[in-house]
Image: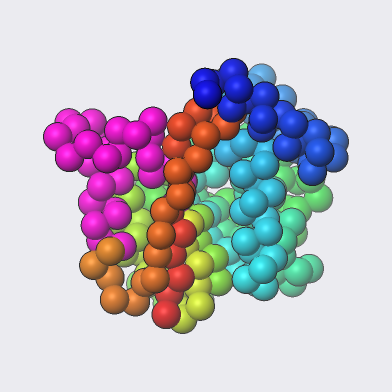
Amino acid sequence: MSQPAWSRVDAWIEQTLLPPDEALAATLEASEDAGLPAINVAPNQGKFLMLLALMRGARRILEIGTLGGYSTIWLARALPAEGRLVTLEFDPHHAEVARANIARAGLADRVEIRVGPARATLAAMIAAGEAPFDLVFIDADKPNNPHYLDAALALSHAGTVIVADNVVRDGRAADPASTDESVAGIRRFMEKVAAEPRLVATAIQTVGSKGHDGFALALVV
C-alpha cells in the first residue's frame, strides 16, 4: 500500500466514525490561516487520545506541545466539568492561536496554556509540587523527549498513562546509525522507557493521512 491508500482509509474511518465537528474544523482552518505547520494529529488519532483519557477516567491531563490546540481540544473533551488540562507551548503565536481555538470550542474553563520552553516550565511545576496528572501526552520537540519523560514521571502517580507521538518517523527511528537529532531523541526516550521499572510500555507503528509513524504508550505502575 502507499500514501494515497493510507489517506483514503483514514478518510473512510473519519466519515464512518467521526461526525462533522464545527469546532475542530474551525481549529484546523484558523491554524492554517495563522501559518502554523500542519503537524497536528489526524482526526481519528485525536479521537483515540480522547478515548484513552475517557477510559482512564482522567481528571488532570498534561500536554507537552500545544500547537494550535487541536489535540488539546480532543483531550479536554474527555474531562469532567471540574477537570483540568495544562498544555505547554514554546511559541507565543501558536499559544495565541490555540487559546482562541480552545475558547471557540467552549473549553477555556478547563484548559490552561503555559508559554515558554517546556523543560523550564516542567522544572518549575515539579519544584512547586504541582499535583500529579492522570494522563500525559508528549508531542513536542523530539530531541527533548528523554527530558520530557523524566518530567512526566515526576508529575505522575501509579496509574498515570503516558503517550508519546511520532516515535517511528517513517521507520527512521529503527536506525541506530541515524544522525537526525529527532531520531536520536526518540531512541533515547524509548531506551529510558525500557529501562524504567515504574513503566509498563509498548509502541505501535501507524500509517494514515500523516504518513508512517507511531506512538508509545506507557502505564506508571
* x 37%, y 72%: residue: 199
Left or right: 62 in relation to 127? right
Q: Position of residue 109 (x, y in %)?
A: 74, 59
Q: How is the image coloured?
A: rainbow
Q: Is residue 219 above or below residue 4?
A: below
* x 67%, y 42%: residue: 44
Q: Can residue 133 be seen at all in this image of the molecule?
A: no
93 vs 137, nearest the viewer: 137
Q: Is residue 126 magenta?
A: no
Q: Is residue 51 above or below residue 95?
A: below
Q: Is residue 203 above or below residue 156?
A: above
Q: Position of residue 106 (x, y in %)?
A: 81, 50
Quadrant location, the C terminus:
bottom left
Q: Position of residue 72 (x, y in %)?
A: 63, 49
Left or right: 112 in relation to 155? right
In the picture as drawn, the residue positioned furthest to the left comes out as: 177
* x 69%, y 65%: residue: 54
* x 30%, y 46%: residue: 186
Q: Is residue 175 magenta?
A: yes
Q: Position of residue 30 (x, y in %)?
A: 70, 27
Residue range highlighted in magenta: 164-193
Q: Can residue 113 be seen at all in this image of the molecule?
A: yes
